[in-house]
Amino acid sequence: MADVKGKSLSKSQVEELAIHLENAELQAYEVTKITDDFPSMTYEDAFDIQWEIRRRKEERGNKIVGMKMGLTSWAKMAQMGVEHPCYGFLADYFTVPDGGEIKHDELIHPKIEAELAFVLKDELKGPGIHIGDVLRATDFVMPAVEVIDSRYKDFKFDLKSVIADNSSSSRFVTGGRMADVADLDLKTLGVVMEINGEVVQTGAGAAVLGHPAASVAMLANMLAERGESLKAGSFIMIGAITAAVQVNKGDNFTVHYQGLGSIGGKFV
Ligand code: 0L1
Ligand code: MG
């Protein structure tokens, strides 16, 4: 990612912006994108803010249960006017059981995305990780649905602002059947998303950077820029196979995964 090195924000500005964005998340209110007030902030500043939000949650006793990639489809990058995927972390309280209820009032303007999750059996440490490394290190893949909820008004942001906002992470559902990557054609694996019994989106795995494992490889390589890696046992959501769909209170959703079963939930 261009412009990833170098900082323009002080430590106290990073801390203030982390508190600002985390409060918006926890109390479910919108804010304007932070680059409006800090136009010279860098990608490194943006990741510093995200990692400070993560540190604050861990300090309060939350566990980090996984990672997610975002903006991994060329269509979504073009739609949002950004030029590179991003990553975020998944905290323990983001987890929703399959078929469970998601409280709409705890969120601002949630949307759902059909994704897949990879669970690793071996560590992946960049740089230079490629699809083959990911497939060799994968224990299994399984269905996942992400609920994104940008803290920015009307989902209007740029890439630096969205990275600082933990890439819009808020909730996720996982379940269905786990499968060995050797038994799947991940590029053609089809998904069908239904809301209130109506099909609203369909897609195939190749929507994610041409191959779902490419997303995990990119995450390992991006983490390496901060000296971090994906440890054995990591749970990683690869980014949206379908467009994100807005959901309202009372909506039920189900996503069917070719050969991997279905998962769903309800917004209450
Ligand atoms: O998970 C995603 O692909 C979303 C990342 C952030 C962008 C957005 O909020 O739409
Ligand atoms: Mg997503």
Image: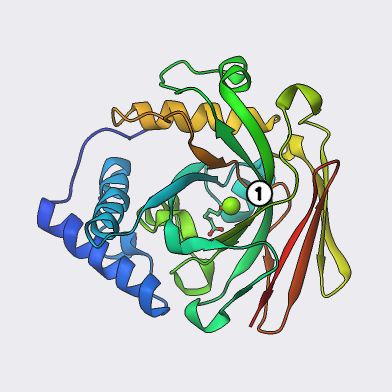
In what quadrant of the picture does the N terminus appear?
top left
Q: Closer to the camera, 38 or 128?
A: 128
Left or right: where 12 falls relative to 197: left
Q: Examine the rendering and report whether any part of residue 170 can be seen.
A: no
Q: Amino acid at mark 1?
A: Ala
Q: Give x and y (percent) for residue 175.
A: 68, 52
Q: Secondary structure at mark 1?
A: loop
Would the CB of label 1 be found within 8 Å of ligand 2? yes
Does residue 73 lie above or below 139 as drawn?
A: below
Q: Give x and y (percent) for residue 71.
A: 57, 47
Which residue extends farthest right?
Answer: 198
Q: Residue at x 67, y 33 (%)?
A: 212
The residue indicated by pointer 1 is: 240
Q: Closer to the camera, 16 or 194?
A: 194
Q: Residue at x 35, y 54 (%)?
A: 164
Q: Examine the rendering and report whether any part of residue 65 can be seen.
A: yes
Left or right: where 114 falls relative to 28: right
In what quadrant of the picture does the C terminus appear?
bottom right
Q: Residue at x 44, y 69 (%)?
A: 152
Give the total number of marks visible in the rendering.
Answer: 1
Q: Residue at x 61, y 45 (%)?
A: 239
**Colour scheme of the picture:** rainbow
Q: Give x and y (percent) for residue 79.
A: 64, 54
Q: Quadrant of ligand 1?
A: bottom right
Does residue 196 lie above or below 171 as drawn?
A: below
Left or right: where 136 falls relative to 48: right
Q: Closer to the camera, 44 or 41?
A: 44
Q: Give x and y (percent) for residue 147.
A: 59, 63
Does residue 140 lie above or below 192 as drawn?
A: above
Number of other residues with Cα within 10 Å of mark 1, as a class: few under 14, some 14 to 19, many 20 or more: many
